[in-house]
Amino acid sequence: MKREKWILGMGILLFFISCSKEYSLENSLNNNNGLIIGTDCRISKIAYSDTVNGLTFGIGSIAAGINTLDVVTGITKFDSLSSTIDFISSPIYANDTVYINADEYYLVDAPNNRIRQLHGLTDPTDPFSPQFEVNYFYDGIGYLTSKFYSFTSNPGFPYRIVNYTYTTGKLTHMSRIEVMTGDLEMDADISYYNNILPTRFLYLFPDEKEYPYFTQFYNFGTRPSNAPKDITVRYYDPGNVLRDSTVSSFSNYIMSRDNYVLSVQMSGDDQISIPASAGKLSFSYKCK
């Protein structure tokens, strides 16, 4: 059975690889490479690599299979260093529900196809662990403004609230608060390039550590208007005592002629919300 699952996983992976467009980006200049991605496209793959002593090697990738109806049929995270599959999911759809596995699912708001709720497990490896819900709230422009976490056994009484602050179409600040004490669990600040306006680039929800493999491939509202420059995320112990932080910088954006990001250099720390390791991030797209 394990061998059959491995063969199935490798088959799906090879399908993703064969269907994804790979681009040579090494000699490209920002918005000057002649490449046009297309109309109404979205990220289908993020490949990440690093350079040591002048040699570039692949670290891994995360890819989504997206069919002609713009529906995600599978998500695979591949470790290039060990040639193994780290994660694989084949979502199942039933009316307004997207089952990401047998026990966890998203609910979709039909009129705009946005995610409105998540049903999850505190320990995804244990189906008997406490269940929780996340409710997503959007503003009139479609930006995700807050998330309320509550236990399924105690609905309507959030134990955690995440708030997002936007400035002229850009997510600039995040705070994640433990409701009972009012203490910060996390907060973050994001700065942007004023002159780089990518088409349908990454969602930047710095708190998203539970389900980052799904975030980039589903609809969580309007994406930021500008390309990120720096992300700083801070983690706190009870009493708002700073425990740790992660800082990442983005540079050397390579753009298509129609303003899709083809690659970017992410330096510094990994970010829990971005399903890729720091290094050179390269993007493939699926167009409608």
Image (cartoon, grey):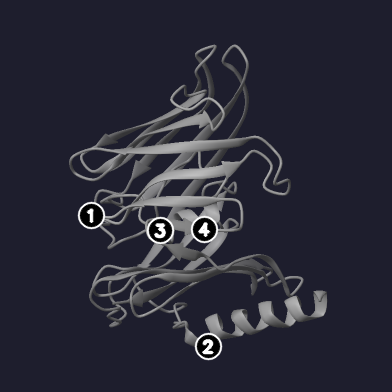
* CB contact under 8 Å: marks 4 and 3: no
Residue at left offset 23%, top offset 38%: 139
> Looking at the picture, does residue 79 appear above or below residue 249?
below
Instruction: Using the numbered discs, state the Cα–Cα distance from disc 1 to disc 3 in whole angstroms.
Output: 15 Å
Give, as a three-letter code, the residue at label 1: Pro
Residue at left offset 55%, top offset 49%: 211
- Mark 1 highlights which residue? 111
The picture places residue 204, in percent across and down from the top left corner, at: 41, 47
**Among numbered discs 2 and 3, the one appearing first in the sequence:** 2
- Mark 2 highlights which residue? 18
Q: Residues within 10 Å of mark 4 (few under 14, many from 20)?
A: some
Instruction: Using the numbered discs, state the Cα–Cα distance from disc 4 to disc 3 in whole angstroms.
Output: 13 Å
Q: Is residue 46 visible?
A: yes
> Looking at the picture, does residue 8 appear above or below residue 52?
below
**Among numbered discs 2 and 1, the one appearing first in the sequence:** 2
Give, as a three-letter code, the residue at label 4: Tyr
- As drawn, which residue projects farthest toward the bottom? 18
The picture places residue 67, in percent across and down from the top left corner, at: 40, 78
Instruction: Using the numbered discs, state the Cα–Cα distance from disc 2 to disc 1 in whole angstroms.
Output: 33 Å
Mark number displayed over residue 137: none
Instruction: Using the numbered discs, state the Cα–Cα distance from disc 2 to disc 3 in whole angstroms.
Output: 22 Å
Tell me if 224 is positioned left or right of 71 in this view: left
- Mark 3 highlights which residue? 218
- Mark 4 highlights which residue? 99
- As drawn, which residue projects farthest toward the right? 2
Find numbered disc 3 in the image and state the secondary structure of the residue it sits on. Answer: loop
* Count of labels in the image: 4
Instruction: Using the numbered discs, state the Cα–Cα distance from disc 1 to disc 4 in whole angstroms.
Output: 19 Å
